[in-house]
Amino acid sequence: MILVVGSIALDSIETPHEKSEDVLGGSATYICGATSKLADTSLIGIVGSDFPDRYSQLFEEWKVNTEGLEVVEGKTFRWSGRYHSDMIHRDTLSTELGVFETFNPVIPESKKGAEYVALGNIHPDLQHRILDQVKKPKWVVADTMKLWIDIARDSLERLIPRVDAIVVNDEEARDLTGEISLTSAAAVLLEMGPSSVIIKRGEHGASLHMGEDLFYSPAFPLHKVFDTTGAGDTFLGGLIGWVAKKGNSDSATLKEGIHVGSCLASFTVESFGVDSLQAADRAGINKRLEVLRDLTEVPRIVF
Ligand code: AMP
């Protein structure tokens, strides 16, 4: 079973082409959208009394266990952002914590034995609280964001040695380590304790750094990117989902997991919210996995 913790949000997003309001988002939501396609998933999070029923039903449709989802009087976490024309860089317009302000994650007794733990992007103190409660997970992966590097660096630096894998984007890797080269940044992060470091490089894919093992995966080539919100979370969900499905976290499995994560993220960016990810079926996913594999397969060349 995968235990997922993170934000559950109502997002309002502006892209150069369209606007959306109060769309279901949040790091935990996108992670669950991906993991629930691959393994049993239990969610730990909080929403307010304004959280729409149709969104609660989505988690049910995905068969996500919501025993650890608190519904309390007040407002659900809201985030709004505006994308630049490159659809990669974005400005946060507002963050309204609402019920998140007093969130103290409590893992139900029956979920403390979770084998896999996905620490979605939330304050690192809350990520610590999850790790303080789980018994002996086989594999823990954590995500973060620039905000926490800026305002909660100490807590984050104490979290990194506690996880098996950390997923960061290129900017975060540089900010966290002060290194310009991403290879050096990964080496510094590995020194801090996790057995693997995964660096997301946006449209250029992702890299896995694990001991001496180095692996690059391209991103799925899309003609039209609609909204990149949640791509990183979906990627992480695909990765841990694959690890849980295989019951293995060796480098070969992580490489496959990175392809699965990249593939699922390519669906997320095709719509606002989780609509495209949800609609992705096995045949569609397999087709994209084939394309991803063919992108980098070359016969051995002897010059
Ligand atoms: P990503 O595009 O992968 O970085 O994830 C986007 C999601 O992160 C959105 O759905 C937001 O609701 C959520 N988010 C934005 N800011 C925060 C924050 N400070 N804490 C937790 N989640 C956030």
Image: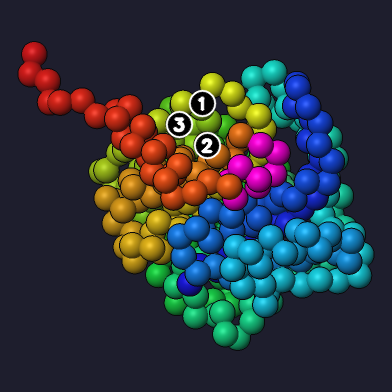
Residue lying furthest top in this view? 303
Categorize mark 2 by other alpha carbons within 10 Å: few (<14), some (14-19), many (20+).
Answer: many
Residue 275 highlighted magenta (yes or no): yes
Query: Is residue 235 in view from this perspective?
Result: no
Task: Give SS at disc 1.
Answer: loop
Q: Which mark is residue 222?
A: 1
Q: Residue at x 44, y 50 (%)?
A: 282
What amino acid is found at the position of numbered circle 1 in the picture?
Answer: Leu
Categorize mark 3 by other alpha carbons within 10 Å: few (<14), some (14-19), many (20+).
Answer: many
What amino acid is found at the position of numbered circle 2 in the picture?
Answer: Ser
The answer to the question of whether label 1 and label 2 lie on touching residues, with beta carbons closer than 8 A, is: yes
Which numbered disc flags the more N-terminal residue, 3 or 2?
Answer: 3
x, y percent for residue 240:
45, 57
Name the residue carrying label 2.
Answer: 266
The answer to the question of whether label 3 and label 1 lie on touching residues, with beta carbons closer than 8 A, is: yes
Q: Compared to 288, does 240 lie above or below?
A: below
